[in-house]
Image (cartoon, helix red, strand yellow):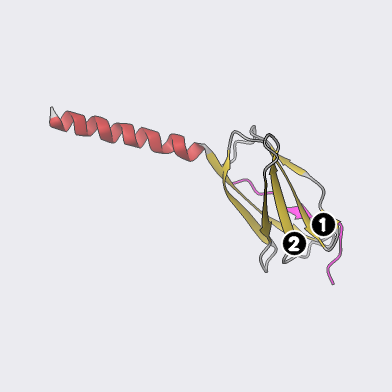
Amino acid sequence: MRPLLLAAALALSLSYAPTYAQDTRDLEGIVSDLKGNSIAKAIVQIEDTATLQVRSYIANAEGKYYFLGLSSGTDYRLRANYRNHSSGWHMLTRFDARRRPVVNLKIDFVAE
């Protein structure tokens, strides 16, 4: 009886793990200017369209940004800002099934 319970517990735990993993996704991208040059220190904002909660990230030296653990059942909009210039808003919807979507943002600006 005990081996049967252990096997059932193991099967239950293994079936739970993929379900949890599918509930979140990680977003990444690069912020660039009109010529395609990456922009370090650009501020990337992501907004949950239901709650209006905003998270921010400062792009690294290569212009890369990351948002980890986003809900896959939530719609988001995001944009990048740098020196009073903006990329405009981009949407990441709950219908986008990618686990690690890449959204590159282009700011209407030319880096010097």
**Relative to 1, 111 lies left or right:** right
Quadrant occupied by the N terminus:
top left
Q: Earlier in the sequence, mark 1 or mark 2?
A: 2
Q: Position of residue 108 (x, y in %)?
A: 86, 57
Q: Establish if 23 lies above or below 26.
A: above
Element carrying mark 1: loop
The magenta region covers 100-112
The residue under label 1 is which amino acid type?
A: Ile
What residue would you read off at disc 2? 42
Q: Is residue 75 magenta?
A: no
User: What residue is drawn where x is 68% and y is 34%?
Assistant: 50
Q: Is residue 109 magenta?
A: yes
Q: Position of residue 48 (x, y in %)?
A: 67, 40
User: What residue is drawn where x is 76% and y is 44%?
Assistant: 90
Q: Position of residue 38 (x, y in %)?
A: 74, 64
Q: Position of residue 96 (x, y in %)?
A: 64, 36
Whether label 1 touches label 2, CB < 8 Å: yes
